Amino acid sequence: MSGDGLLVVRCQLGEREAFRELVRVWHAPLWRYVRGMVGSPHLADDLSQEVWVAVVRGLPRLRQPERFAPWLFTIARRTVADHLRQAYQASETSVEEASALADDDSLRDVLTTMQVEAGLDELPPLEREVLILFHLQDLPLAACAEVLGVPPGTVKSRLHRARRMLRSALAEKGYEA
């Protein structure tokens, strides 16, 4: 069993230190994924916290502890989708979200990171999500397929299309892709 699997089993047995370690290992990748999907660091903080609450509630029922990463990102994906759905239905951006979007530059300190983020922002959600999971979160193809709820072949075709769209978006912005 993998290190994550053992941590999950220890969490299921009630070891608080194991949960702290699980959060320490997975919070940053989770946050980067959520931020990549919503754009705002402040909103990513809130949604990541919601994901961890769902993890605490669902961890005792996780039957395959070694599959923690795909399970975590599936929860994150659903949390983000729920938020986006609610935001769309409300069809108004709150003042807090608008100011959070204005603070978006706080984490952009490397030119290549800025270029990639600029390109990702131009992509539709499905293409942006598959690139974040596969390239930024380093999930294997099968895990991406599990998180997205699609066959691996669909992940491959989305990756191909997303890479092509990212190259095009970066070229339009004057970046060499």
Image (cartoon, rainbow, N blue to C red):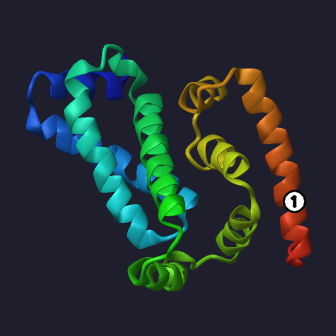
**Residue displayed at 46% across by 38% down:** 73
Q: In the depicted view, which residue is nearer to us: 3 or 143?
A: 143
**Residue displayed at 32% across by 22% down:** 5
The three-letter code of the residue at mark 1 reads: Arg
User: Which quadrant of the figure contains the C terminus?
Assistant: bottom right
Q: Quadrant of residue 49?
A: bottom left
**Residue displayed at 89% across by 78% down:** 174
Q: Position of residue 142 (x, y in %)?
A: 62, 23
As displayed, is residue 147 above or below residue 83?
Answer: above
Q: Is residue 151 left or right of residue 99?
A: right
As displayed, is residue 1 above or below residue 29?
Answer: above
Q: Which residue is mark 1?
A: 167
Q: Position of residue 165 (x, y in %)?
A: 85, 55
As displayed, is residue 70 above or below residue 49?
Answer: above
Say few, some or many: other residues with alpha carbon within 10 Å of mark 1 (under 14 / 14 to 19 / 20 or more): some
Q: In the depicted view, which residue is nearer to us: 125 or 19?
A: 125
Q: In the depicted view, which residue is nearer to us: 63 or 175?
A: 63
Q: Position of residue 65 (x, y in %)?
A: 33, 20
**Residue displayed at 53% across by 68% down:** 91
Secondary structure at numbered mark 1 = helix
